[in-house]
Image (cartoon, coloured by chain):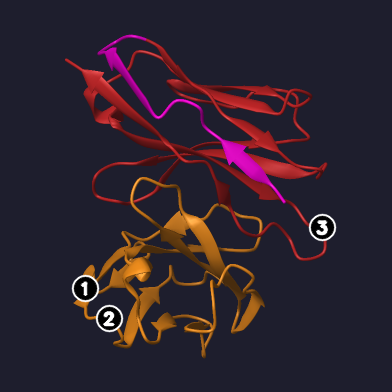
Amino acid sequence: GAGVSQTPSNKVTEKGKYVELRCDPISGHTALYWYRQSLGQGPEFLIYFQGTGAADDSGLPNDRFFAVRPEGSVSTLKIQRTERGDSAVYLCASSFGGGDEQFFGPGTRLTVL
Amino acid sequence: AQTVTQSQPEMSVQEAETVTLSCTYDTSESNYYLFWYKQPPSRQMILVIRQEAYKQQNATENRFSVNFQKAAKSFSLKISDSQLGDTAMYFCAFMPFLSIQGAQKLVFGQGTRLTINP
């Protein structure tokens, strides 16, 4: 694909449920980032992958959040025991290398009822 | 820790006018990048312009230019001949450059909602 894609575009779930959000980066991009954007705020960093490994996961808010990138391409953000405060738009971005322009996907809007 | 502050929550101008969006940041890093991103209602973040801190010359991209004042830690965006399609949220962002690992995460401001009126 030409750009970063994220699925689903919208996800509604109930409090306490488990959700997975998927990100397909631009082909050949080794760096992948997850950000969370709450309503009316700027995006906040969650985690950064260089290849298959998480180079920086300092932004993950607690141990209910986990992300993987097993083959160095597609990444999945996993949220356990969702809470209403997890409602936000989750943005994924990728770049050719760690210092290059980050290209963003359209985001997944997560709503926890 | 780095912080980015955008003091203008909303701005509105007439089409064809020039508008300037303000941004200040706080960091102890000496090497870093600064960015302006545009986010239309589609949610897609689009890079508008980028500035390397070591470059004294202000970046320019067509109708978009910046005023980078390193000592004052200020990075404003000027949009000339504004167009209806410029209506969007605009985010200022900072990225420290770590020479070993390379640049990493973006730190965003709170955003400025810009409306261009016909």
**Magenta segment includes A80:** no
Q: Are marks 2 and 3 in contact (CB under 8 Å)?
A: no
Corner quadrant of residue A15: bottom left
Q: Residue B99: which numbered mark, if any? A: 3
**Magenta segment includes B15:** yes
Q: Which residue is mark 1?
A: A113
Q: Are marks 2 and 1 on the same chain?
A: yes
Q: Colour of chain A?
A: orange
Label 1 secondary element: loop
Q: Chain of mark 3?
A: B
Which circle, 2 or 3, is nearer the viewer?
2
Q: Give amino acid for label 3.
A: Ser
Q: Give amino acid for label 1.
A: Leu
Which of A52/B109 is in front? B109
Question: How far apart are labels 3 and 1 at the CA level?
Answer: 43 Å
Q: Which residue is mark 2?
A: A15
Question: How far apart are labels 2 and 3 at the CA level?
Answer: 42 Å
At a point 30% along the width and 14% down the height, the residue shown is: B13
Chain (red): B
Q: Are marks 2 and 1 in contact (CB under 8 Å)?
A: yes
Q: Is residue A90 above or below residue B64?
A: below
Corner quadrant of residue B73: top right
Tell me the magenta residue range: B1-17
Horizontal side, residue B23 vs residue A99: left or right: left
Badge 3 local density, few (<14 within 10 Å), some, or many (20+)?
Answer: few
Q: Chain of mark 2?
A: A
Q: Residue B45: which numbered mark, if any? A: none
Corner quadrant of residue A72: bottom right
Label 3 secondary element: loop
Q: Give amino acid for label 2.
A: Lys
Q: Is residue B52 above or below residue A25?
A: above
